[in-house]
Image (spheres, coloured by chain):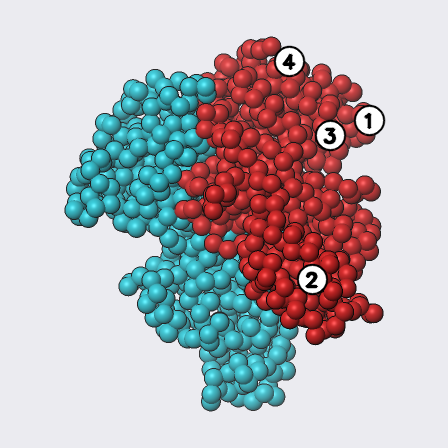
Chain colours: A cyan, B red
Amino acid sequence: MYRDPVPSLEASSFQPSAAAAMRPLRVGMIGIGTVGAGTFRVLARNQALIAGRAGRGIEMVVVAARNLARAASVVGTDVALTNDPMLVATHPDVDVVVEVAGGTGPARAWVLAAIAAGKHVVTANKALLATHGNEIFAAARQHGVAVAYEGAVAVSIPIVKALREGLTANRIEWVAGIINGTTNFILSKMEGEGLGFAQALEQAQALGYAEADPTFDIEGVDAAHKITLLAANAFGMPVRFADAQVEGITRLQGLDVACAEQLGYRIKLLGVARRRDDQGVQGVELRVQPALVPATHLMAHVNGSMNGIMVKGDASGITMYYGAGAGSEQTASAVIADLVDVARLDGTSAAQQVPHLGFHAHAVDHNLAVLPRAAVLTRHYLRVPVHSAQQIEAVGAWLAAQHVPVLQVQLAHNKALPPGSGPQVLVLTDAVAQATVDLAVHALAAHPAVAGPVVTLRVEMLEG
Amino acid sequence: MYRDPVPSLEASSFQPSAAAAMRPLRVGMIGIGTVGAGTFRVLARNQALIAGRAGRGIEMVVVAARNLARAASVVGTDVALTNDPMLVATHPDVDVVVEVAGGTGPARAWVLAAIAAGKHVVTANKALLATHGNEIFAAARQHGVAVAYEGAVAVSIPIVKALREGLTANRIEWVAGIINGTTNFILSKMEGEGLGFAQALEQAQALGYAEADPTFDIEGVDAAHKITLLAANAFGMPVRFADAQVEGITRLQGLDVACAEQLGYRIKLLGVARRRDDQGVQGVELRVQPALVPATHLMAHVNGSMNGIMVKGDASGITMYYGAGAGSEQTASAVIADLVDVARLDGTSAAQQVPHLGFHAHAVDHNLAVLPRAAVLTRHYLRVPVHSAQQIEAVGAWLAAQHVPVLQVQLAHNKALPPGSGPQVLVLTDAVAQATVDLAVHALAAHPAVAGPVVTLRVEMLEG
């Protein structure tokens, strides 16, 4: 069902010298929680400045909220309020719908209704786009509207713009990011103060860095939503969240944080998307997991609740993007940047000029698949509990015999070990397929020298 | 003199579904040195991928070069070659002119001719835009064409795009960057290997990180060109290179690098643009100088020939951008991203949708002036040579009496001092106007305790 665009939008042929005279972009917003309130506040505070950049004003005309009284306390009396998000999605006075309510099912319906009504959409909803992105972007293409989502990926960091516009010359080799502020805060606490996961999570909750139900964050789901969207933009593939391999930090032990430090590494929850075309393996690694990063690496210095993302392009080399990992106005910064992009568009067809996922429809490779876990190729860290320190050589030799390319073997120092712990052999490997590591670890379990469960973590060098 | 745009461009109404069928964007390039050759190579190598992102092909049709034989060895036989840059600037088959020849006088004439002929312009020429930008952008606005210059500022880092599009919600408070790879390489050598400036420069030249005539780099002029362009985009002001305060690293002593390290700082050549509106001071600090940065700060970890830029916005908080500080294909990455932006434009009027300097003409504040050096407000580092270590207290007290807000006073350790050096008092101050520091230093020269020239450097905390 296609509706003609709002007539006045159509009529507004762009006249640079008359920019000040163009009528404002009219915004309807669904949701007025943390991000919505920040968006309203920043739009109001920086109104003139934003209009000077956009070439016209950006005006909030209607907001949908569950609690109208609370919404009124934020937006005052100049903005219409409603309980019905669908009314905002299809409102005749609205040019663009900002969806910051979250969730997937209802949000999908609102966004699709807005698109069908010829509205542009701006959303900070990563779960929505990771799960329903292909359907939503196809609908937007059909109706010639923009669906912008900078706020869905890395808070205030313009990483979607960097990938989709700033690095377009490049064959992207990989994207790797610390893209969840909650888990980075927890990991920084575990490392800096020697806390266990549970204690660090408690502190994060007490300080407001983790939600009451932190599952999506600590299980890596939120980071997986984000890296999935980045992968699509980097490689020209559909949104393939269902195929991503997702591991959070809930099983990470303080012991491994300490052992990693001994080896000169720090553990970060990384979202990684890497294009592979080697040794007969073709496809994309798409995965989230706690991984060791060299302590001297810039990514190891992304601490607390901050985000950091690295992109390796064949021409650009490595570029990195860093900023806040959470925050009301910080996310609003990205939502409003998307609104300015829409305001700068000259009529609706232009919405397609920067394609939603970086590549035009004809150039999206639907055969580009996510590689299975077994094929993922990285360096590895292994911690092998042994009965006696003398068995260090046996473990190293035995792993090598199992085709694990061992680079370094050492014993964990006593200061890294909790009281009463037996000796631990630490192993760093060269790049090796996960399948080989899994087999070796499975077999190690039966080795007489091994005194307990073997822990493995990936090691990411993040090198040019 | 306005010429109608190339008719076929005008006729190409944008049809997303027919994107693959659109005719290519035709490029004429002036200069085929390091950046030009890289641009040609990356365009050729990633042709299909770039077309998939841009929605149409990007095709080099003519190149102007001094040495035609050498140019032919780069571009082969499919591209027309000429000795005459003006011919490229006004070529009827060219939609966009890439200027990568460098220099200011002739480049200005070529670029203005291309604009007058209705061509879009992409340039990596910071000197040109810093000195003639206001004239060039005004002409481009008049003729409705784009002048894009991502490659002129920070090599492959999309920082112009970040400021002009990604952070549009924000009142930008400051931009600070390590934006010259040559000087950062030299400073990293001075710090890492304890070299003096002259030795470090020699090594940089031997390794190709510094040109035979490195004046523009080591005197800070190149960095000043770049920070001037960033300031215009950040604050909505004209290009004011002539007003920038520029100090290079040629007078920097290894002794101060060592003393800074003792205090927990590293010295970086920083370009800083900071909006001021305090204590009756209104305007923009626009300056390049070697400055102390806390050793634990992310910017202190931007080493070797890398670039790093921080931006503080009122909503976004601090974001940072990092990447290569030099390189043929690295710069080409930015030049081609600009070409893709042009290729994605739907007709010529759209060229104005993202204004050249981030703000539409009516919103540029022509009264926003660069503050004089005396008004610049930062923390300071002072090194005061004294006759005897006992005089440390006298120096501290005396500076405080001169209204210098002293935070910390200590003696340089022996290991920081070269053989035969007398004692040195190191002082860190709180924020203080340059005028106050200058007066105090001038007066200190007459102080009986002082044994030689006092060195002052700015300290930048780069905090949120």
Badge 2: few (under 14), some or many (20 or more) residues near its Cα, within 10 Å? many
Residue type beneath disc 2: Arg
Residue for point 22% across, 31% down? A91
For label 3, the residue is B103
Badge 1: few (under 14), some or many (20 or more) residues near its Cα, within 10 Å? few
Q: Nearer the viewer, mark 2 or mark 1?
A: 2
Q: Is residue A247 left or right of residue B291?
A: left
Q: Residues under labels 2 and 3: Cα distance?
A: 39 Å
The label shown at residue B67 is 1
Q: Residues under labels 2 and 1: Cα distance?
A: 51 Å
Q: Earlier in the sequence, mark 4 or mark 2?
A: 4
Spot occupied by residue A150 in the image (x, y as percentages of width and height): 42, 43
Q: Is residue B388 left or right of residue A344?
A: right
Residue for point 33% across, 46% down? A38
For label 4, the residue is B92
Task: Work out whether residue B254 or residue A257 is closer to the camera in this orientation and state it.
Answer: B254
Q: Residues under labels 3 and 1: Cα distance?
A: 17 Å
